[in-house]
Image (spheres, rainbow, N blue to C red):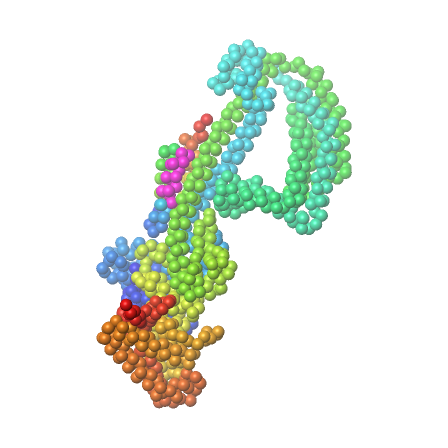
Amino acid sequence: MRFLELEITNVRGIRHMLLRPQGRNLLVIGPNGVGKSSIVDAIDFLLTGDISRLTGRGTGSISLASAGPTLGCSPEQAVVKATISIEGIKDEITFGRCMANAKKVVCEEKYKYALDPLLAVASKGQTILTRKNILKFVAENPSDRAGKINDLLNLQDIESLRKTLVESANKCGKEFDVAKAIESNAVRDFLSAVGQSALDSAAILDYANSQRKVLGASPLASLRATSPKNGVVPPSATPSPTADWNEIRSTTTSLVKQLQSAPVALRKYVNDFNSVIQELHSSDQLAVDAKQVQLTTIGLELLGDDDACPLCETDFPHGELRTILAQRIKNAGMQSERLGRLGHMSGQLRDSVAPLRASCERLLKLCAPILTDTCTANLKQYGGQLTALESRVAEAYERLTCIALLDTEAEAIADTSELQKCMEGLLASANENEHVFSPAQVAWDRLTRLELSLASLDNSVAARRRATATNLRAQSLLRSFVTSKDALLNELYESVQNRFIEFYRFLHISNEPGFTATLRSDNAGLDLAVDFLGQKMAPPLAYHSEGHQDSMGICLYLALAEHLGMGKIHVTVLDDVVMSVDTEHRHALCALLQEKFPDHQFVITTHDYVWAMQLQESGTVQHRDCKELSQWNLDTGPYDGPLPDLWERIDQALAKDDVKEAAPLLRRGAEEFLQTVCDALHANVVFKKSHRFELGDLLPAALGRYKRLLNEAKSSAISWGKSEDASTIDELESIRRQVLQQVQAEQGNVNRVVHYNEWANLSPEDFRPVVAAFHSLYDLFFCSACGSAIYVIPEIGDSQSLRCKCTEMNLNLVRKTAP
Amino acid sequence: MSEPSKENGSLLEQVLQRTLADLAASGTWDAESLESLSSLLTISTTLSQNSLMAVLRSRDTEEKG
């Protein structure tokens, strides 16, 4: 798609404007504040139904309806229309949008089939590169760059799918961990029910059959096929026991044993823990280091099988994050070792406290109907103290502080005499009631417990197996997706990278001919590394100047631009972008746009008239496609007209007898022009460190070089026996002499302009011949057939030919060598 | 849920095709589940996590053994 015509009515300060680029590049020039960006906004609106400048940060309550129409106009009056050409379609197609209904595209029904796919691509708004946005591709961190370039390449759907897969994989991983923990508990309960230490099927079957035997039932061949109580007749009912004396006895015995040693050990552990904490805090830096090690350790523990950072969910190559975190912990030396000791001590404390507390709680539950009030109170109080101690240990370890334990609290934990008396009472009761249950009742109860714990174990194993399978699938899906995505995107990025390198080398052939770069997808990020003078690959910000970074931004955008239009949109708007390129590389940028994008239409805005001239001289933009905006005011919007060329502008100034305006135009224009000529003809200009070459430096160099080139061309023509070419060269030489005479005739006035800048003292009559002489001088270096400037090839090395673009002028500079 | 957009569908489609082929080769997915996954991924580009979890947890995903 290319613009043939663009009509803007009542949009962003423009009242009415008609542009007719006819598919060619379009240049809009004018000082700041005359409406150049309004044209960009209008194109943005036409293609997307929105104006990106009116959205985003800092735009607050501004809306398209309120700020889109020119002040005083309603949204109904704000309209942008375009006539376009579409590749493969003969007809020109006209379509438009009105701000009153921004999403609706108005066009003839019969063209919608062709227009809709184009606007679907264009609606992403990626056809416009603004000066503000150039650096965002090179200066961002990898993750933000990936986001911006993915936006530009319209890869949001792929990224969105990746995030969903990561979330699902994480969820499945967590569910698997939970299922595993539940299964472990079920195994423990089951083993406790059958009095075994391992899952030995034969031993468990023996246990079940021994209980069945007590109840007079036949042995089972397997516990898998049937219930352990299958075929067992329940024992006759007996009065409900008041308590399970067997368990009360075993639990009480266990608690008594623990009370004899645990409190002393607890105190020692607390003291040891607190001394290590004091070592850890012996300096502020050590305390900070310890916190960092602790955080890293937590990160390592949380690291799942999916290799994603548990904090930000960034994906890492398999095992990389685990290695990084482990290395950090290793690097922390003594603090890591201290933290390890603390972890061990807090574990010992927990392991000592938890069984004591669990025994207290168990007895309270088992003996509720028979406990005295004093025993109940003692057990609750002791259990409560232990629970509080557990919390303090956990808190102290988490915060890396001392375990705050008052002496009275420590004494209370150590003083177990009252509790021991209670336990003695309980044991006596248990012994008295030992024979309350019949063996058949005990066996029945054991089979019941076995049956329940076996069912629970089966359920937990099945759940863990389902979680394992689901997790395997989720992880494999994520892995395959990420691998496929990275491979495909890297192919795409490699193609972009190669074009980026090609463009940047084209712009910087003189100082970075061997430039190279890498653009690589790295999980959720996109790394851009560029070569710095063959020394090092680094991010663009590391070594390159801002000007070079700007160049990179433009080159990367242009490399991406080839993918952005998806072969459908052949328009790119460069809004004040060329200003970011330093003067040294502007000619190269013109050549880049022409040579690398011959079928692409650029809409270029700038406020720099020298730039405008360079764009025209290089043939990037034709004079008829230059639009100058000026004198904006509220009532009329910008004045727009064709951009006058240099001679028209000088004539306009002289028509007003304004030499003060005309002379600097001539001087500045001539300096710019002759720089182009000297560059194109490889003329020797006296070097200046300041790079500020003036007319006095350039004029003799250009004329002298041209004369020598004609001499070389004539010698070559004679050596090859081409007398016709020699005659043509004689004519060119004759013209050159005439122009030189004309310039010399005005030498006095020319010198004032060239050397002394005494233009203020010249009258219009004195100045007009100077202008005429320079005009003739200009013509000397242009092809009369194609209008392009003449140049020498090759770019580097010995000159071989003096030519123009259309080859109407194509003079061989190489003499025939003697046989 | 939105229809896949034509202009970037090709790249997304390529990623999905490669992913499904890789999964089929890995053996972690049986043909029937892979078919369900394929349908789910190609129907919508804004895949909901619930739909995906339903496919991941489908009954025949239970680990054998």
Drawn side of residue A409 relative to residue A615, left or right: right
Q: Main secondary structure of the magenta part?
A: helix
Q: Is residue A65 visible?
A: no
Query: Which residue is painted at 76% across and 31% down in the image?
Result: A415
Which quadrant holds residue A257?
top right
Magenta-drawn stretch contains B23: yes
Give coordinates of residue A657: x percent, y percent: 37, 87
Which quadrant holds residue A129?
bottom left
Q: Quadrant of the C terminus of chain A?
A: bottom left
Which quadrant holds residue A697?
bottom left
Query: Which residue is painted at 49% across and 20% down in the image?
Result: A224
Query: Which residue is painted at 61% across and 44% down in the image?
Result: A330
| Residue A593 vertical position relative to residue A184 in the rendered view, above or below | below
Drawn side of residue A153 relative to residue A224, left or right: left
**In the rendered structure, which segment of residues is drawn in magenta?**
B15-29
Seen from the viewer's position, the closer of residues A213 and A579 is A579
Seen from the viewer's position, the closer of residues B33 and A450 is B33
| Residue A27 vertical position relative to residue A104 in the rendered view, above or below | below
The single residue placed furthest to the front in the displayed view is A819
Give coordinates of residue A274: x percent, y percent: 72, 41
The single residue placed furthest to the top in the displayed view is A216
| Residue A713 vertical position relative to residue A234 in the rendered view, above or below | below
Q: Is residue A643 visible?
A: yes
Give coordinates of residue A80: x percent, y percent: 33, 64
Magenta-drawn stretch contains B20: yes
Query: Which residue is painted at 77% across and 37% down in the image?
Result: A408
Q: Quadrant of the N terminus of chain A?
A: bottom left
Seen from the viewer's position, the closer of residues A249 and A354 is A354
